[in-house]
Image (cartoon, grey):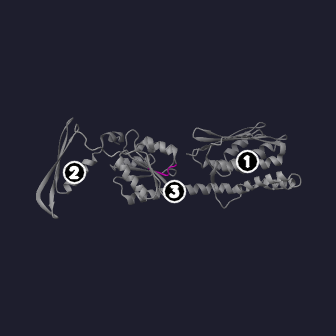
């Protein structure tokens, strides 16, 4: 296949070929003389039109382009990135190194009602995608430095076909470009000049595909969410009933924590499968306050939470792991122990650590848990949910008689 970088440098000469077509279709002719280093002279003839009738005489127009001639009129200045807010919920990034083309495409996207961000090079496109949530990319094939092929390959290292659809634009329309675009992960391919109705159809199809994939993910997460059973509620209610006879203030506090727990854990009508990290932390803290009432001095809790750390997390991910640490780690140890929850930012990720100094887990059971061959729902459900989240990871470390440490890495929220 011809190297696309070479074509970037030499250009396709489409402007001259289009001009020739227009002159000849008008019944005229065009010619050129040129001397390297001095300039070019383009001469064309077109029929005169008078009162709507053609006449045989031809008028000759000569355009002389001198490389050293002074420029009397400054060209239009374009500044990128540019963005326009739309009324629809999707944001489209368009990338083209030709500002006039970019402006036309930008106006098309705006007319369709989407929020649009326009940049004029591949490097800026990658920067925008790291900083903002983008739903679809429309990417010119031939650009200097980073071509459309290069940018698409970089995107596919982080986003799959459903996460971030990509449409490749090209003026050439060569079949080799189409094949290579699809091979490197482009979803679709459009030839310039762009027709608005065709662009609209392609964009709507890819965004509907993205929406369907997201709904499928949410439905699967909801299934795992609904499988979690609140085993400890019965014991908690008995504890609160006992407190009503001895400590009215603590009873009220326990009921507030229990209400918070119920709101998140038992509200199946909301179907909030993905929540902000702060919501999950609130649930965990309410759960641990209830357990501290039940276990009294046998349960110690330590927090190390960076308030600036922010991520989207499947609902009921940290809480079941903390519950697992209390019920299967600390509760099984005669003199009790400590549960630690650490949440901190690491580069562009959020690191979550749930650690206890309980009885630990045997090597065999660790293997069963990580392979999904164990019935402990409080562990397997969070593990399965996190496997559905792109760019996340889940590790388990444990030693019998020493304790257990679970580490989760999630992509941070882009500001």
Which class describes the residues within 10 Å of circle 2: few (<14), some (14-19), or many (20+)?
Answer: some
Residue 71: image quadrant is top left
Q: Residue, x 51% and y 52% (percent of image)?
A: 162
Question: Over which residues does the magenta segment extend?
Answer: 133-137
Q: Which mark is residue 89?
A: 3
Q: Nearer the viewer, mark 2 or mark 3?
A: 3
Q: CA distance from mark 2 to mark 1?
A: 74 Å
Query: Which numbered dot is residue 285?
Result: 1
- Position of 354 with respect to 65 (left or right) is right
- Measure how far apart labels 2 and 3 are at the Cα level: 44 Å
Task: Check disc 3 and report its element: helix, strand or loop.
Answer: loop
Q: Which residue is mark 2?
A: 20
Residue 270: x and y in percent read: 65, 60
Looking at the rendering, which quadrant does residue 40 occupy? top left
Give the spatial CA distance, label 3 vs label 1: 34 Å
Left or right of residue 268, residue 102 in this image: left
């Amino acid at each position: 296949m011809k190297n696309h970088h070479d074509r970037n440098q030499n250009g396709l000469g489409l402007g001259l070929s289009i001009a020739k077509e227009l002159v000849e279709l008008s019944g005229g002719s065009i010619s050129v003389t040129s001397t390297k280093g001095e300039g070019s002279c383009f001469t064309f003839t077109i029929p005169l039109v008078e009162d709507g009738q053609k006449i045989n005489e031809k008028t000759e127009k000569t355009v002389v382009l001198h490389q050293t001639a002074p420029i009397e009129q400054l060209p239009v200045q374009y500044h990128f990135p540019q963005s326009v807010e739309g009324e629809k919920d999707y944001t489209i990034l368009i990338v083209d190194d030709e500002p006039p083309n970019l402006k036309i495409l930008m106006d098309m996207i705006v007319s369709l009602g989407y929020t649009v961000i326009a940049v004029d090079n591949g490097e800026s496109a990658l920067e925008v995608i790291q900083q903002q949530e983008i739903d679809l990319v429309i990417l010119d094939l031939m650009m200097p430095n980073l071509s459309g092929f290069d940018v698409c390959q970089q995107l596919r290292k982080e986003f799959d076909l459903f996460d971030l659809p990509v449409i490749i634009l090209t003026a050439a329309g060569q079949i080799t470009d189409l094949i290579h675009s699809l091979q490197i992960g482009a979803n679709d391919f459009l030839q310039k000049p762009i027709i608005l109705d065709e662009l609209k159809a392609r964009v709507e199809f890819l965004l509907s595909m993205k929406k369907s994939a997201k709904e499928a993910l949410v439905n699967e997460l909801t299934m795992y969410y609904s499988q979690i059973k609140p085993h400890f509620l019965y014991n908690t209610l008995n504890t609160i009933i006992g407190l009503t006879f001895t400590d009215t203030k603590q009873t009220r506090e326990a009921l507030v924590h229990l209400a918070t727990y119920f709101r998140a854990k038992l509200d199946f009508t909301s179907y909030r499968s993905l929540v902000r990290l702060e919501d999950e932390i609130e649930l965990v803290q309410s759960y641990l306050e209830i357990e501290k009432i039940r276990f009294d001095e046998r349960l110690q809790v330590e927090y190390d939470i960076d308030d600036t750390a922010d991520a989207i997390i499947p609902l009921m991910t940290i809480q079941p792991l903390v519950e697992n640490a209390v019920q299967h780690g600390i509760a099984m140890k005669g003199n009790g122990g400590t549960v630690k929850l650490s949440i901190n930012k690491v580069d562009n990720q959020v690191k979550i650590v749930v650690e206890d100094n309980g009885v630990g887990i045997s090597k065999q059971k660790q293997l069963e848990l990580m392979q999904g061959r164990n019935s402990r729902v409080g562990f397997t459900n969070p593990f399965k949910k996190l496997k559905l989240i792109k760019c996340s990871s889940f590790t388990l470390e444990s030693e019998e008689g020493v304790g257990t440490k679970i580490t989760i890495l999630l992509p941070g929220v882009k500001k």
